[in-house]
Image (cartoon, rainbow, N blue to C red):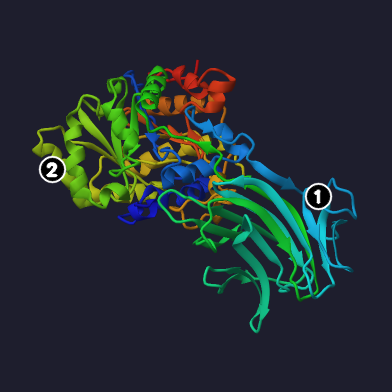
């Protein structure tokens, strides 16, 4: 079952998270907020519980969702986020990376086999409408194309092919062909018909599907992701034009086990001028992050416990493979070293009664997180309503357990207050706080700090969220199936936090709770996140930290934050 099918059962965290940055950006810009809740006169001295959200899609390349998140972190600029258990399977993922700027004007592009009839040419030229150089395919033949062909190392895995092109007169049947051996498996062209000029793609039956309209003397950036053997799916190709996906999971022209050639050319029978720039071919999935083993889970427990993380809030997926990490935790000999609780979204609430029958008895276990003298802690990211909350309370009572402490999440204080009142929850919280367009971490932390009081003023009891980052750009470069509108993610990012900045923000949350004990009676804070690597929030050790520094730097900083009183990092 695909992630999109899982999410169709109800509102999922993936469906609603896209709202976070927009809401957060307003706060980061200092937009008006209600007055902060008045601090209490007493400073609480009891130890504050520190939790961290887990989102466990890191199940390896054999599964669709695992392969998807692997691809988001394959570009070199994102590999610093890889979890400590990841492997870089292709150290040199770039097969071709050519902008032509360093090549001699008037020569054929290096590394490419070129062909042109008498009077036609394929040569590097100075670009007249952009910086640097490009390749000009000048075709005056009318009987044979001008072409440039690049062989690359044969790939049996997905490849990502990028290039820019323009025709001086558009729609002259310029062609881009991804080839296996001698057979084209992807065929993209420009064409002209009665309705205008278009970019089109050929289907296996020979028909052409329109991708978008095009104009004369205009550059277009194209990206093709082609996978000959995707997990749990047929071979497919995605096509993007200027960053917008125009074809999704289309079949290859013919089944192919490998890719090895890219050809860019003009038409056999039409004269034309075609320009090419920024040709790039890369292995799409060059890392493998599979944390779904017992030894890795045991190591994660050790890391978390050593840093003083009291519990994980698992985004509760009932189904395999996203349930694997939770089940490995529950089967670990070390599970009592860190507690856990559930964080529910549409994946759980879609079959609520069935899933509650499994979850509720676990409230009784010693390693299920309790607050306020024994009340099981339960978060709802989405899908909460009065009937479901009542069922949770009734099921706990039926089992002879304490009344659960139910926390609902919302993106604004006003919506949190309305939701808490409507469903009968005990408290409110927030999944994460993010920034946009490169907002500094300090500005995001300051906005989130203000939100703790804003939520308390509007909604009452609060579990403060401590966000560690927000950067969705990997999901713009390699869109995930569970986010339909990925284009805003290009600007959906803030700057990376230092370990010290995260520790300072955590200390602030603990201090706020201990100076507002009536607003935060559960005496817990929730970190976003343990392992949201491609979404931009994590404290789980990374491959970069362990390999280059020998220490989990973020967790080391968190470990130094006192959990009592007016905490401040040591």
Residue 130 visible from this viewpoint: no
Q: Is residue 535 above or below residue 370?
A: below
Q: Is residue 59 above or below residue 336?
A: below
Looking at marks 2 and 1 on the same chain, the residue that comes earlier in the sequence is marked by 1
Q: Percent from the top left, x then y, of residue 211?
A: 59, 68
**Label ID, residue 100:** 1
Q: Percent from the top left, x then y, of residue 296?
A: 40, 26
Q: How would you rate the neighbour count of disc 1 (Cα within 10 Å): few for under 14, some for 14-19, many for 20 or more?
A: many
User: Is residue 552 found left or right of 427 in the rendered image?
Assistant: right
How far apart are the two marked residues, 2 and 1, measured between alpha carbons? Answer: 69 Å
Residue 194 visible from this viewpoint: yes
Q: Is residue 167 above or below residue 94?
A: below
Q: Secondary structure at mark 2?
A: helix
Residue 516 lies in what quarter of the image?
Answer: top left
Q: How would you rate the neighbour count of disc 2 (Cα within 10 Å): few for under 14, some for 14-19, many for 20 or more?
A: some
Q: Tell me the residue at 78%/62% (across/down).
A: 275
Q: In this figure, what is the number of numbered marks?
A: 2
Q: In the orientation shown, which residue stands out farthest toward the top?
A: 570
User: Is residue 317 found left or right of 210 in the rendered image?
Assistant: left
Q: Tell me the residue at 51%/35% (across/down).
A: 445
User: Is residue 460 found left or right of 262 in the rendered image?
Assistant: left
Q: In the orientation shown, which residue stands out farthest toward the front?
A: 182
**Label ID, residue 394:** 2
């Amino acid at each position: 079952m695909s992630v999109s099918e899982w999410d169709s059962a109800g509102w999922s965290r993936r469906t609603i998270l896209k709202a976070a940055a927009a809401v957060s950006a307003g706060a980061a810009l200092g937009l008006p907020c209600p007055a902060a809740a008045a601090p209490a006169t007493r400073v609480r001295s009891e130890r504050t519980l520190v939790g961290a959200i887990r989102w466990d899609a890191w199940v390896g390349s054999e599964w669709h969702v695992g392969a998807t998140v692997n691809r988001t972190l394959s570009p070199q600029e994102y590999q610093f986020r890889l979890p400590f258990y990841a492997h870089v399977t292709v150290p040199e993922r770039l097969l071709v990376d050519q902008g032509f700027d360093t090549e001699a004007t008037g020569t054929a592009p290096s590394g490419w086999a070129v062909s042109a009839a008498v009077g036609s040419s394929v040569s590097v030229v100075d670009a007249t409408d952009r910086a640097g150089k490009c390749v000009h395919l000048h075709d005056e033949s009318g009987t044979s194309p001008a072409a440039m062909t690049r062989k690359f190392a044969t790939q049996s895995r997905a490849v990502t092919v990028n290039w820019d092109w323009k025709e001086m007169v558009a729609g002259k049947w310029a062609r881009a062909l991804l080839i296996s051996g001698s057979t084209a498996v992807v065929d993209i062209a420009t064409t002209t018909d009665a309705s205008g000029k278009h970019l089109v793609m050929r289907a296996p039956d020979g028909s052409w599907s329109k991708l978008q309209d095009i104009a004369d003397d205009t550059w277009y950036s194209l990206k093709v992701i082609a996978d000959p053997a995707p997990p749990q799916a047929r071979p497919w190709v995605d096509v993007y034009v200027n960053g917008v996906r125009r074809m999704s999971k289309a079949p290859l022209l013919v089944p192919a086990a490998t890719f090895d050639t890219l050809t860019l050319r003009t038409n056999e029978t039409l004269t034309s001028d075609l320009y090419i720039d920024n040709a790039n071919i890369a292995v799409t999935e060059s890392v493998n992050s599979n944390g779904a083993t017992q030894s890795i889970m045991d190591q994660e427990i050790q890391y978390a416990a050593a840093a003083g993380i009291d519990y994980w809030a698992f985004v509760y997926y009932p189904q395999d493979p996203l349930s694997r990490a939770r089940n490995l935790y529950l089967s670990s000999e070390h599970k009592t070293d860190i507690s856990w609780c559930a964080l529910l979204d549409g994946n759980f609430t879609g079959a609520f009664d069935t899933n509650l029958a499994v979850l509720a008895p676990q409230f009784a276990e010693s390693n299920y997180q309790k607050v306020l003298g024994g009340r099981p802690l339960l978060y709802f990211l989405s899908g909460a309503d009065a009937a479901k909350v009542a069922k949770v309370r009734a099921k706990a009572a039926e089992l002879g357990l304490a009344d659960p402490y139910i926390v609902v999440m919302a993106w604004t204080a006003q919506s949190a207050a309305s939701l808490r009142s409507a469903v009968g929850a005990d408290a409110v919280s927030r999944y994460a706080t993010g920034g946009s367009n490169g907002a500094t971490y300090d500005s995001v932390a300051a906005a989130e700090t203000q939100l703790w009081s804003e939520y308390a003023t509007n909604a009452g009891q609060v579990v403060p969220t401590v966000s560690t980052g927000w950067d969705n750009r990997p999901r713009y470069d390699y869109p995930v199936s569970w986010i339909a509108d990925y284009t805003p993610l290009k600007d959906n990012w803030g700057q990376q936090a230092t370990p010290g900045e995260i520790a300072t923000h955590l200390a602030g949350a603990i201090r706020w709770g201990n100076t507002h004990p009536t607003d935060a009676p559960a005496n817990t804070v929730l970190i976003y996140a343990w392992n949201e690597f491609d979404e931009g929030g994590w404290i789980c050790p990374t491959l970069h930290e362990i390999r280059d520094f020998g220490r989990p730097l973020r967790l080391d900083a968190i470990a130094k934050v006192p959990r009592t009183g007016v905490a401040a990092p040591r």
